C-alpha cells in the first residue's frame, strides 16, 4: 500500500438543515459495554490424611456436580510395615517403607494390603490391585489426573490377613505406622462460548441486516471448556438486546431465548447447546459450571456493515473516539481521528489514534497525519464528527485562531454522504475514510470514490446507524449509551 504524507484539512462544510437530534438529551457519558472478564479459575485444593489403619476411610470433599471435576490427584508420604518372620510366606517377610500402593499379599489372598486409593462414584484408583507383586515400591509422591465427583473418599485397603496366634505371643505379626496424604487439586478452567453462523465461528458474529425481508439469523451457540478436556455443564442462557426499545419486526418478532434455549432446573439440565433465531443485534450470555465453578461468557451478534467495521475492537475504538470527542459545551467538542491498521502477520485489524492530528483538531476540523506502525499496514482512516445541529452551527472554531468561524458548518451528516469535501478528498488518497457521528450514523467513504459525482456522494450507500433508536442494528459497543 502506498504511503504518502497526508496534509488534508477536513471539515469545512455545507450549510445546515435543522436536526431533531438536538432535542434529545445528551447521554452523560459515552462508554463501550462492560467486557466480560475471562479468567482461568480453579476450585480450592483439598487434602486429607489417610491413616495406615487397614480398612480406614476418610472423607475428602463433596463436589455434587454430575459432570465432575478434573483434578490432579497426589498421593504422598510413605507408610512403614514391620513383619514378623514367622509369617513371612504371606508377604515375603518385608520390613520397610511402602508407598500408596501398599504391599502384595500372596497365597489365597492375592491383593494389596494397606493400599491407599481415592474412591469417587464407586471407582477406586489408583492403588488397590495395582501393587507390585515383588518388592513394594517406595514412590514418595505420585500424581495423575482424573475426573471425580460427588462424595470423594480416601480409602485404605485391608491390613495383611493373619490368624490369631500366628506370631504369639505378639498380638499381630505386623506393625504399621505412618499415613498417606491425599491431595485433590482442581485444574484451572474457563468457559469458552462460541457462536456459529454461515460457516463462521467466533465470539463476535456479523449477520445480514435485520429487516423484514432478511428475517432472522439462526445461530448455534456452543459452550466449551478451556482447556477442552475440563468437564462443564450449562446453567443458563440469556439474550440481551443492544437496544431493548427498538420495535421488533411485526412478523418475525423478537429473539425468544426462553422458548428456544430454556434454562432448566434440576432434575432437568440446561443444554450445552443453544440454537437460536436471532432477530436483532444483541449478545448471548451463557453461565456454565466449568470444573466446579460458575463462569460467564458472551457472544455478540451484530449487523454486517463493512469488512473493517465488522470487528468488535474497531467498533469499540470508534465509539471511544466519539466519546473523547464529546462535550456538553459544543464549542469544546473535538474531532478525533486515527488509523485502522492490519497486522501483516496475523491479519488482525486494530486502530491507533492520530495523536498529532488530535492535538490540533477542532469541533469540525481535523488534519490527518501519516503514521507508520512497524509490522502493520494502513488500511483506513477514521475520524469523528461531534458537531450536531443546531448547536455547533455557530461555534466551529478556526483551526489557527481557535475563534468561531463566521459561517455555518456541515451539521447535517446526511449531507455529502456523511463526509465533507475534505473527507471525500482524503478518501481518494488510497484509504477508505470511516466517519462516525455523534448524530448516530457511521459512514464509509470508499477509496474508489474518486470519480463519484456530488449526487453519488450524497447517495453514499455506505451508511449505517450505530446509535440506539434507529432500528435493530445498534452497535453492541453502544449498548450503554
Ligand atoms: Zn470529517
Image (cartoon, grey):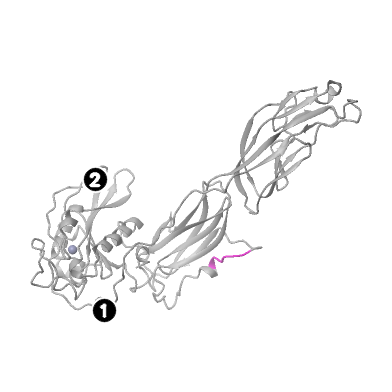
Q: Residues within 10 Å of mark 1 (few under 14, many from 20)?
A: few
In the displayed structure, does residue 189 sit left or right of residue 150?
left
Is residue 188 on the magenta stretch?
Answer: no
Distance in Å between CA atoms under marks 2 and 1: 42 Å
Residues in magenta?
260-265
Which residue is pictured at 69% across the width and 26% down the height?
137
Which residue is pictured at 13% across the width and 49% down the height?
5
Of the pair 166 and 5, the residue shown nearer to us = 166
Of the pair 263 and 254, the residue shown nearer to us = 263
Please say if 220 is above or below 472: above
The image quadrant in which ligand 1 is located: bottom left
Q: Which residue is mark 2?
A: 373
Q: Residues within 10 Å of mark 2 (few under 14, many from 20)?
A: few
Which residue is pictured at 42% across the width and 61% down the height?
300
Residue 190 appears at what percent x and percent y?
A: 50, 50
In the displayed structure, does residue 332 sit left or right of residue 350?
left
Residue 423 appears at what percent x and percent y?
A: 16, 62
Residue 34 appears at what percent x and percent y?
A: 40, 60
Tag on residue 23? 1
Residue 432 appears at what percent x and percent y?
A: 22, 57
Of the pair 92 and 378, the residue shown nearer to us = 92
Which dot, 2 or 1, sits closer to the camera? 1
Please say if 76 is above or below 12: above
Amino acid at each position: 500500500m502506498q504511503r504518502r504524507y497526508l496534509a488534508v484539512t477536513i471539515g469545512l462544510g455545507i450549510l445546515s438543515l435543522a436536526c431533531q437530534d438536538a432535542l434529545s438529551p445528551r447521554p452523560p457519558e459515552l462508554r463501550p459495554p462492560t467486557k466480560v472478564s475471562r479468567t482461568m479459575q480453579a476450585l480450592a485444593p483439598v487434602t486429607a490424611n489417610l491413616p495406615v489403619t487397614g480398612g480406614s476411610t476418610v472423607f475428602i470433599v463433596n463436589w455434587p456436580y454430575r459432570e465432575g471435576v478434573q483434578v490432579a490427584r497426589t498421593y504422598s508420604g510413605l507408610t512403614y510395615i514391620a513383619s514378623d518372620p514367622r509369617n513371612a510366606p504371606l508377604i515375603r517377610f518385608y520390613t520397610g517403607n511402602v508407598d500408596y500402593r501398599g504391599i502384595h499379599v500372596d497365597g489365597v489372598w492375592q491383593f494389596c494390603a494397606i493400599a491407599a486409593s481415592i474412591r469417587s462414584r464407586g471407582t477406586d484408583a489408583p492403588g488397590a490391585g495395582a501393587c507390585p507383586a515383588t518388592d513394594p515400591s517406595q514412590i514418595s509422591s505420585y500424581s495423575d489426573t482424573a475426573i471425580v465427583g460427588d462424595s470423594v473418599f480416601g480409602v485404605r485397603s485391608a491390613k495383611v490377613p493373619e490368624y490369631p496366634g500366628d506370631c504369639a505371643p505378639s498380638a499381630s505379626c505386623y506393625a504399621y505406622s505412618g499415613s498417606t496424604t491425599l491431595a485433590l487439586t482442581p485444574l484451572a478452567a474457563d468457559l469458552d462460548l462460541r457462536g456459529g453462523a454461515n460457516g463462521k465461528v467466533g465470539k463476535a458474529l456479523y449477520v445480514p441486516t435485520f429487516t423484514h425481508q432478511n428475517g432472522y439469523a439462526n445461530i448455534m451457540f456452543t459452550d466449551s471448556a478451556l482447556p477442552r478436556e475440563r468437564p462443564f455443564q450449562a446453567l443458563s442462557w440469556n439474550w440481551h438486546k443492544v437496544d431493548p426499545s427498538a420495535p421488533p419486526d411485526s412478523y418475525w418478532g423478537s429473539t425468544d431465548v426462553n422458548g428456544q434455549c430454556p434454562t432448566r432446573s434440576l432434575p432437568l439440565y440446561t443444554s450445552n447447546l443453544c440454537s437460536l433465531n436471532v432477530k436483532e443485534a444483541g449478545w448471548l450470555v451463557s453461565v456454565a459450571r466449568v470444573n466446579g465453578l460458575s463462569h460467564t461468557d458472551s457472544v455478540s451478534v451484530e449487523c454486517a456493515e463493512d469488512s473493517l467495521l465488522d470487528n468488535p475492537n474497531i467498533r469499540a475504538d470508534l465509539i471511544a473516539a466519539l466519546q473523547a470527542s464529546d462535550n456538553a459545551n459544543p464549542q469544546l467538542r473535538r474531532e478525533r481521528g486515527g488509523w485502522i491498521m492490519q497486522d501483516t502477520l496475523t491479519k488482525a485489524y486494530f486502530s491507533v489514534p492520530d495523536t498529532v492530528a488530535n492535538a490540533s483538531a477542532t469541533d469540525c476540523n481535523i488534519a490527518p497525519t501519516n503514521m507508520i506502525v512497524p509490522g502493520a499496514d494502513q488500511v483506513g482512516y477514521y475520524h469523528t464528527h461531534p458537531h450536531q445541529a443546531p448547536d455547533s452551527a455557530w461555534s466551529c472554531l478556526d483551526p489557527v485562531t481557535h475563534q468561531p468561524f463566521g459561517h455555518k458548518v456541515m451539521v447535517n451528516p446526511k449531507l455529502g454522504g456523511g463526509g465533507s469535501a475534505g473527507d471525500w478528498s482524503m478518501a481518494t488518497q488510497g484509504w477508505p475514510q470511516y466517519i462516525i457521528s455523534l448524530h448516530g450514523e457511521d459512514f464509509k467513504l470508499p477509496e474508489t470514490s474518486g470519480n463519484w459525482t456530488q449526487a453519488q456522494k450524497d447517495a453514499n450507500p455506505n451508511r449505517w446507524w450505530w446509535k440506539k433508536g434507529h432500528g435493530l442494528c445498534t452497535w453492541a459497543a453502544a449498548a450503554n449509551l
